[in-house]
Image (cartoon, grey):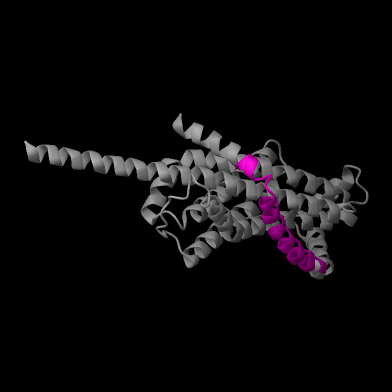
Amino acid sequence: MIAVQQLVRAFGLALVGSMHPRMLWLSLRPFLIISVFWGCLIWLTWTPTLAILGSFLTNSIFTNWIQDGLIWAGFDHARAWIAPFFFVMLVIPLIAISLLVLIAFSTVPTIVNNLCRQSQYSSLQCKQGGSLIGSLAYTFWSAFICLALVMLTLPVWWIPPLFAILPPLLWGWLTMRLMAYDVLARHASSQERDTLIQQYRWSLLVMGIACGVLGAVPTFFWASSALALVLFPIVSFVALWIYSLIFVFAGLWFSHFLLDALQNLREDELNQALVVETRVMDSGEQ
């Protein structure tokens, strides 16, 4: 019950905090970086990639049935848009994961620093349980696992009800992993971090999945733009900024929850130490 109260409290603080102009800027900065990077990459690789995908979808015995099935179903111009559609569906997870990694690595530490200037967290001692190299290794390893799972499960994403289950689970798992490490990297020791993640693993997973569900919303907008294709550039940028806002909100939510949990953990340890010391003194007097 206490964990639920902490979770709800942190959610409310994160919701209010995400409307702050500084947080809106923190969501805009990674959005611009990722937009420029992927915009240039897609522009440079669009034509050759479509040619490779079109040839693969037409000639491969594993995929040529897709075009035949669409033509049989009445989509006579399937060959014209099936390759762009598959290209978009392959790019969406890559863009989302790269944005989450950038926010977790560069934006979450800034969020934590801002929160620690507030009176409720200003007394937290920094124990430097994480390092830059450790954060990089943890981030890229987690992203690699998530990307592998995405590519393995992507063919069944649009099969009901898997389209409503798999993406939130994958984004939620990755969000939980990245946010938990980066929020606690500076202020918690490695032992404290492991204790908190173990103690609140289900609460953290619920938070991650909730953020994953929110993150699935722009995916549906992006999918509809992929079907239209003409609207893809416009809708994709809007969806990407929504992703960025959601991930910044997730950073605030995890930061409030875990910093508060870290304070409670240290207070409990201090109280236990005082109780033990008092008992030792009482036994010595006797």
User: Bounds of the magenta span?
Assistant: 14-43
Residue drawn at point x = 71 percent, y = 63 percent:
33
Q: Is residue 119 left or right of residue 234?
A: left
Q: Vertically, is 36 above or below 28?
A: below
Is residue 25 rendered magenta in the image? yes
- In this orientation, which residue lies closer to the viewer: 62 or 242? 242
Total marks in image? 0
Residue 60 seen in the figure: yes
Residue at far front of view: 119
Residue 21, horizontal then vertical, whole percent:
70, 50
Q: Vertically, is 266 above or below 129?
A: above
Label the magenta part by its dominant secondary structure. Answer: helix
Q: In this view, does 195 lie to the left or right of 7?
A: left
Q: Vertically, is 233 above or below 220?
A: below
Residue 26, horizontal then vertical, whole percent:
67, 55
Residue drawn at point x = 45 percent, y = 31 percent:
2
Residue 93 seen in the figure: no
Q: In this view, does 285 lie to the left or right of 241?
A: left
- In this orientation, which residue lies closer to the viewer: 179 or 45? 179
Residue 195, horizontal then vertical, whole percent:
38, 47
Residue at far left of view: 286
Residue at far right of view: 76
Which quadrant of the structure image shows residue 130? Answer: bottom left
Which quadrant of the structure image shows residue 81? Answer: bottom right
Residue 260, horizontal then vertical, whole percent:
47, 43
- In this orientation, which residue lies closer to the viewer: 161 or 102? 102
Is residue 122 rendered magenta in the image? no
Q: Quadrant of the C terminus?
A: top left
Residue drawn at point x = 71 percent, y = 40 percent:
159
